[in-house]
Image (spheres, rainbow, N blue to C red):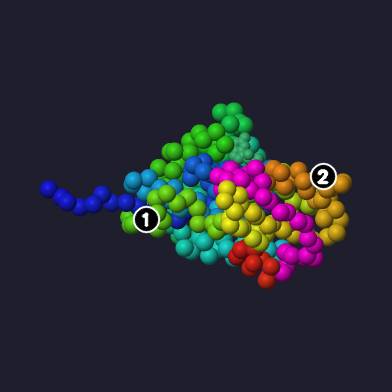
Amino acid sequence: MSSEQPTTRSGFVVLAGRPNVGKSTLTNAIVGAKVAIVSDKPQTTRRAIRGVRTTPAHQLILVDLPGVQRPRDVLTERMQGRVESELRDADAALMLVNAEQGIGPGDRFIAALLKRSPKPVVIAVNKIDRCGKAETAAVLHAADELDVAEAIFPISARAGRGVEALVDHLAGLLPEGPFYFPPDERSDQAEHVLLAELVREQVLRRTRQEVPHAVEVEVAEIDDADEGLIFVRAVAWVETDSQKGILIGRGGRMIRAIGTAARRELERELGTRVHLDLTVRVRKSWRTDERLLDRLGIE
Ligand SMILES: Nc1nc2c(ncn2[C@@H]2O[C@H](COP(=O)(O)OP(=O)(O)OP(=O)(O)O)[C@@H](O)[C@H]2O)c(=O)[nH]1
């Protein structure tokens, strides 16, 4: 008779994919909680957010990478560096492609990047809820022709279709070993970063064109000294006075709407009443300000 402990598997899977393919939605579906914000604007994800999924048998840690892009400014250069270093430290890579759009040059660029690493690569073809059978089959075939993946899964991250089969396969790629995080932990994001992301999500929902990408949110203070009420002071940084004007809106209407919606999200997250103090401030070219990027937690 053996008295050995059942073996567990644990490890890191990096998520790569063009902007807007559904990486955040899939992270949330796998983890079973909202750990990454979702928006219909590309390039929403700026940080490598880890979602942690734990079962008795495995712990799968997802590193939700920013949309892979050629370096353009300090911000995207940092993202690029992040992709490469995360790949080095991961056990496998999961490349997400968009079934609705098919395989394009951006996907080929990512596939080439992944091919340079010896780590196993799995492709998930997402948004199959938007496609017919023949269309999905054509994209699965095109994904296979990228010649990078050892397995390909059709999924709908939004509807949860195919996600369990994908997770089972990924779990099998993880090495045997103890868990990195306590079983009830789902993310390693600092609280102020998560709260700032929830505020930024509401900004993204309500703004258009260049404004969404010009905004960064910093949570400067979280004070829970009052019973049953948490005070959160947040600053929305923009790059120009005109962006500030847009964000504040006529008579302050826009910032009030953002603040009200964000406060509800914070209350849901924190499980208590929240007083949100949200101001808009201009910092010319914060994207190239290394010190501010450090303070905002963008590595
Ligand atoms: N129909 C459909 N829409 C989806 C699916 N998965 C994600 N979406 C939508 O696609 C959009 C982008 O999703 P995100 O999860 O924010 O994409 P992302 O890859 O994290 O985006 P970046 O932050 O730009 O890297 C959102 O509007 C999602 O609701 C899916 O399976 N089906």
Residue 285 lies in the magenta-colored region: yes
Q: Which residue is mark 1?
A: 179
Query: For the residues marked 2 and 1, what is the alpha-carbon distance in whole angstroms?
Result: 47 Å
Q: Which quarter of the rendered image does ligand 1 occupy? A: top right
Q: Which residue is mark 2?
A: 253
Q: Is residue 95 shown above or below 102?
A: below
- SS assignment at label 1: loop
- Along the line of sight, which residue is nearer the eye, 282 or 129? 282
Q: Is mark 1 within 8 Å of ligand 1?
A: no
- Along the line of sight, which residue is nearer the eye, 39 or 164? 39
- SS assignment at label 2: helix
Binning the other alpha carbons within 10 Å of mark 1 as few (below 14), some (14 to 19) or many (20 upward) gives some
Q: Is residue 269 left or right of residue 8?
A: right
Q: Amino acid at mark 1?
A: Phe
Q: Amino acid at mark 2?
A: Arg
Q: Quadrant of residue 279?
A: bottom right
Measured as percent of width and height from the top left, residue 165 is found at 43, 38
| Residue at (73% x, 46% y) in the render | 258
Q: Is residue 209 left or right of residue 195?
A: right
Residue at the farthest front position: 227
Q: Is mark 2 within 8 Å of ligand 1?
A: no
Asked whether residue 149 appears in the rendered view, the answer is no
Q: Is residue 32 left or right of residue 42?
A: left
